[in-house]
C-alpha cells in the first residue's frame, strides 16, 4: 500500500464515521437491545462455528490452490459454504433472523445509512466522474460479486458472531474479538504473500472489521455495513 492509498483510506474511514454518527442520531435507530438468555453459551457456539469455518477455508484452499489475490468467485465459494453452516445453526436452534443482523424494524433506516455511506465513499474517493462516464460489463459484474461477498461475510461476522460475542464479553471486547476474527478469516488467502504485505493486509482487515462492527452496533442491521463495504472494496479495484 502506498502513502496515497493509506491517506485515502484514512480519509474514507473518517468520513464514514462522521456520516454514521450523524445519521444514527435519528430516533429510528433507537431500538431495544438484542438479549440472549445464555450469552456465554451463544458466544461459545459462535467461537466453535468460526473455528470450523476457518478450518474449512484452509482445507478448501489447500485442495484448490490459492494466491495472495484470489478471484472473487473463489472467496464467494468459501463464504457460501460458511454461511450455510451459520444458517443451519440458526434454523436448528429456532432463532430469528434478527439475531443474525437482519431485523425487519431497522431495515429501511439501515438501507438509508448504507446509501449515505456509499455516497460519502464515492465523494471522498473522487469516483463520481468515473461512474458518470459509465462502467464496463466486467466492472458491473465485479460490483455485483463484491456486494454479494460483502453481504454474506457481513451476515456471518457482524450479523451472527458480533452480537453473540458482545453479549458474552461486553460491547467493546466483543468488537475487538470480532475484528481479530475477521482478520484471521483473511489469513488463508494471504499466507503466500510476502511478510510485509501479509502484515499490512491483516492490519487493514482488523481495522475494517472494527469499523464495520461499530456500524453494525450503531445501526443494528447488516445491510448498512454490507453496502458500504461492497462499494468500498469494489472502488479500490478501479
Image (tube, rainbow, N blue to C red):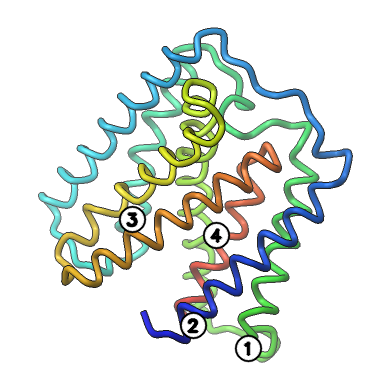
**Could you tell me if the residues under marks 3 and 2 are in contact, i.e. CB atoms within 8 Å?**
no
Q: CA distance from mark 3 to mark 2?
A: 19 Å
**Could you tell me if the residues under marks 1 and 4 are in contact, i.e. CB atoms within 8 Å?**
no
Q: Say which element carries label 2.
A: loop
Choose the circle earlier in sequence order: 1 or 3.
Answer: 3
Residue depicted at x 60% and y 74% = 11
Residue 191 occupies quadrant: bottom left
Q: CA distance from mark 1 to mark 3?
A: 26 Å
Choose the circle earlier in sequence order: 4 or 2.
Answer: 4
* Residue with the mark numbered 3: 75
Residue depicted at x 55% and y 45% = 213
Q: Residues within 10 Å of mark 1 (few under 14, many from 20)?
A: few
Choose the circle earlier in sequence order: 1 or 4.
Answer: 1
Q: CA distance from mark 1 to mark 4?
A: 19 Å
On the image, the x and y values in percent for residue 172 come to: 53, 36
Comparing labels 4 and 2, the label whose residue is closer to the camera: 4
Using the image, tell me which numbered label, if any, was put on residue 238.
2
Q: CA distance from mark 3 to mark 4?
A: 15 Å
Choose the circle earlier in sequence order: 2 or 1.
Answer: 1
Give 134 or 166, whichever is nearer the viewer. 166
Q: Is residue 7 above or below residue 216?
A: below
* Residue with the mark numbered 4: 229
* Residue with the mark numbered 1: 130
**Could you tell me if the residues under marks 3 and 4 are in contact, i.e. CB atoms within 8 Å?**
no
**Could you tell me if the residues under marks 2 and 1 are in contact, i.e. CB atoms within 8 Å?**
yes
On the image, the x and y values in percent for residue 62 come to: 11, 50
Amino acid at each position: 500500500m502506498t502513502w496515497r492509498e493509506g491517506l485515502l483510506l484514512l480519509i474514507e474511514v473518517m468520513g464514514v464515521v462522521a456520516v454514521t454518527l450523524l445519521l444514527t442520531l435519528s430516533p429510528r435507530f433507537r431500538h431495544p437491545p438484542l438479549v440472549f438468555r445464555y450469552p456465554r453459551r451463544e458466544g461459545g457456539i459462535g467461537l466453535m462455528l468460526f473455528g470450523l469455518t476457518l478450518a474449512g477455508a484452509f482445507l478448501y484452499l489447500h485442495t484448490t490452490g490459492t494466491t495472495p489475490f484470489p478471484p472473487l468467485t473463489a472467496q464467494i465459494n468459501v463464504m457460501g459454504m460458511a454461511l450455510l453452516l451459520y444458517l443451519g445453526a440458526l434454523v436448528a436452534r429456532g432463532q430469528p433472523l434478527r439475531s443474525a443482523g437482519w431485523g425487519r424494524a431497522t431495515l429501511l433506516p439501515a438501507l438509508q445509512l448504507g446509501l449515505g455511506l456509499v455516497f460519502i465513499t464515492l465523494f471522498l474517493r473522487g469516483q463520481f466522474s468515473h461512474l458518470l462516464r459509465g462502467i464496463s460489463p466486467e466492472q458491473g459484474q465485479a460490483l455485483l460479486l463484491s456486494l454479494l461477498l460483502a453481504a454474506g461475510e457481513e451476515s456471518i461476522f457482524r450479523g451472527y458472531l458480533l452480537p453473540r460475542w458482545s453479549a458474552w464479553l461486553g460491547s467493546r471486547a466483543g468488537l475487538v474479538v470480532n475484528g481479530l476474527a475477521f482478520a484471521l478469516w483473511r489469513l488463508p488467502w494471504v499466507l503466500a504473500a510476502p511478510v510485509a504485505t501479509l502484515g499490512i493486509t491483516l492490519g487493514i482487515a482488523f481495522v475494517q472489521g472494527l469499523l464495520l462492527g461499530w456500524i453494525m452496533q450503531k445501526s443494528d442491521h447488516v445491510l448498512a455495513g454490507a453496502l458500504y463495504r461492497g462499494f468500498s472494496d469494489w472502488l479500490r479495484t478501479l
